[in-house]
Image: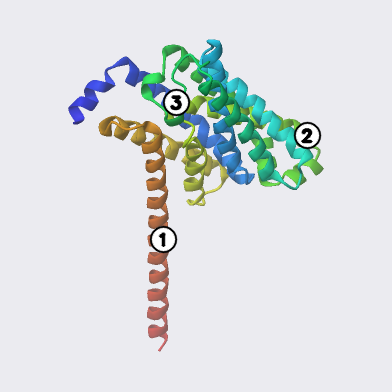
Amino acid sequence: MFESLFEALQMSFMQRALAATLAMSLLCPVMGLFLVLRRSSMTGDALSHSSLAGAAAALALGVNPVVGTFVFTAVCGLMIEALRSVFRHYGDLVLTIVQALSVGIALTLITMGLVKGNAESFLFGSILTISQTDLWCIRAITAAALLWVGFGLSTLTVIAFDEDSARAAGVKTRRWSYAFSLLTASAVAAAIPMVGVLVLSSMIALPAATALQLKVGFKRTLIAAIVISIIDAFLGLIFAYLLDAAPGGVTALASVAVLLLVLICRAAIRRFRHDCAAAAAVKKSTEIV
């Protein structure tokens, strides 16, 4: 079994999949952490549905699907921010509107037979769909997004924790929110060929949720989220190959398993510390007597 895996790693399609997985693992948890802190984790789910429409439109026009995914998802991200000013007290309704538009476009194009390719592969993700052109597009999108995050990290952090205070301090939160939507779109475009539409939100939110359980401060949490995302993605990719399953589903299961492991370890450590403290208190009281 492991011999076949080693042989597969020598193949070009598997090497492209590993490179795309690394890019996805670097970008998705960064955006996911900011989305979780802003209590907007479902935005990733809405944009993942938008990516299917972008991929279907790109295949219908004969354009690279990664590029089409990024463009359409970026438009939908900007639409979400614009509609939030209209439906200020109904944030969930905005996501429903965008999802309805995206799914409607995708289903219409696919059922009309206009799509020149296998759009369904974007539902579940596939290591076989990563071409060399796709890989270069994913690398370029990831590099540009990470550079922009590094440039505006302090501002994004302030907005994520308290947008009202950031606005009162003179930060142009509206402009940064639009830019953040473009960054989220880039994360979706980087991840969609590998993990697919149905479980993409897990790759964005779960590594951040796992890292937040460590309670080690913002910067360390960001680093931990990236490390956890890399572990989840590579475990998912390897076991997907060994089990002959879609990488998206296996990656989602790996993410949940790692989260549960962290929660169990955290509970065990907390119980151990409580028992140690209780034993020390009993020993101290005995010495006093």
User: Residue tagged by mark 1?
Assistant: 267
* Mark 3, residue position: 120
**Sequence-first disc among 3 and 1:** 3
**Left or right: 238 with respect to 263?**
left
Tell me how far mark 3 sits from mark 1, CA to CA. 41 Å
Crowd around label 3: few <14 · some 14–19 · many ≥20 (10 Å): some
Of circles 3 and 1, which is in front? 3
Left or right: 113, with 37 as reference point? left
The three-letter code of the residue at mark 2 reads: Lys
Q: Is residue 150 visible?
A: no
> Which residue is rendered at x = 36% and y = 31% of the image?
246
> Residue 228: where, in percent of width, then height?
43, 40
Specify the amino acid type for callout 1. Ala
Residue 249: x and y in percent read 39, 37
Q: From the viewer's perspective, is 95 left or right of 254?
A: right
Q: Give the numbered dot on residue 180.
A: none
Query: In terms of secondary structure, where does tag 1 sit?
Result: helix
Of helix, strand and loop, which one carries label 2?
Answer: loop
What SS does tag 3 mark?
loop
- Which of the numbered marks, if any, corresponds to residue 172? 2
Image quarter hosting the C terminus: bottom left
The answer to whether 120 is drawn above or below residue 60 in the figure is below
